[in-house]
Image (cartoon, grey):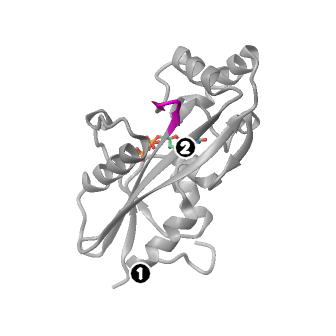
Amino acid sequence: MVPKLILASSSPRRRELLELVNLAFTVRKQEFDESTITTVEPAQKVEQLAINKAKSITIYEDEVILAADTVVSFQGRIYGKPKNSDEALTMLRSLSGNVHEVYTGVMIRSLTKEISFVERTMVEFWPLEIEEIKEYIATKDPFDKAGAYGIQSQGAVLVKNIIGDYFNVMGLPISRVVRELKQFQIVPNPTRC
Ligand SMILES: Cc1cn([C@H]2C[C@H](O)[C@@H](COP(=O)(O)OP(=O)(O)OP(=O)(O)O)O2)c(=O)[nH]c1=O
């Protein structure tokens, strides 16, 4: 039987990226309480979160579960999604003119096999005027995104340079994911789904 890919995520970006490469999948939302993972090392944190998200949903025989978690790391601090405008302002002011890291942890599991890995991308922001930051926050783009910006949306104009996988910043390192999924007999459709 051909295994079915289940995306354990409510992130619209992760859905978009699976669609981009023609992977057929269904979404099963996970509700793992992220606050229970208190690790301060970003790579460990995203990997643990991805593992816990993947394990928090029921898996059936012919299924492969994919889960991920993304954070921004800057000068020893981890930035998740901002809770309000003030927090978004604090995050974006500190990222302004500096280089930060974006980590995404990924877990892929079936009933017989599981793998997890972490990808890191370095992102440099232009020096930002406070007014520019406030105007960006007013667009509401920052609020459902780690580090208070979306590289794939209006936040694109904040970014001067990146080193690493762009899609990792968006929430899923899709090329590595596709390569790892082959081990689970899951491959993209050759024609558009
Ligand atoms: C830095 C950055 C993050 N993000 C997003 C990706 C993730 O959706 C989000 C980080 O939150 P996550 O907790 O990784 O994911 P989520 O809560 O959106 O979804 P789920 O836990 O159900 O899988 O930040 C962007 O879309 N663009 C960016 O440039």
Pick whichever, 18 or 113, lies toward us: 113
Pick whichever, 31 or 162, lies toward us: 162
- Residue interval drawn in magenta: 72-78
Residue drawn 51% across and 36% down?
Answer: 73
Label 1 residue SS: loop
| Residue 21: assigned label | none
Residue type at tag 2: Val
Query: Looking at the picture, does residue 83 appear above or below residue 5?
Result: above
Q: Nearer the viewer, mark 1 or mark 2?
A: 2
Estimate the x, y position of residue 14 in percent, counting from the top left.
51, 53
**Crowding near pointer 2: few (<14 within 10 Å), some, many (20+)?**
many
Q: Residue at the far bottom: name it.
A: 1
Estimate the x, y position of residue 2 in percent, counting from the top left.
38, 82
Pick whichever, 109 or 101, lies toward us: 101
Residue drawn 72% across and 19% down?
Answer: 135
Q: Does the residue labelled 2 lie within 8 Å of ligand 1?
A: yes
The answer to whether 185 appears left or right of 100 in the picture is left
Membership of 74 in magenta stretch: yes
The answer to whether 156 appears left or right of 90 in the picture is right
**According to the image, label 1 marks what residue?**
185
Query: From the image, which quarter does the N terminus lie in?
Result: bottom left
Query: Looking at the picture, does residue 39 appear above or below residue 116?
Result: above
**Crowding near pointer 1: few (<14 within 10 Å), some, many (20+)?**
few
Residue type at tag 1: Gln
Membership of 58 in magenta stretch: no
Q: Residue at the far front: name it.
A: 75
What is the spatial separation of the Cα atoms under label 1 and label 2, in whole angstroms?
29 Å
* Secondary structure mainly formed by the magenta segment: strand
**According to the image, label 2 marks what residue?**
102
Estimate the x, y position of residue 160 in percent, counting from the top left.
76, 39
Quarter location, residue 63: bottom left
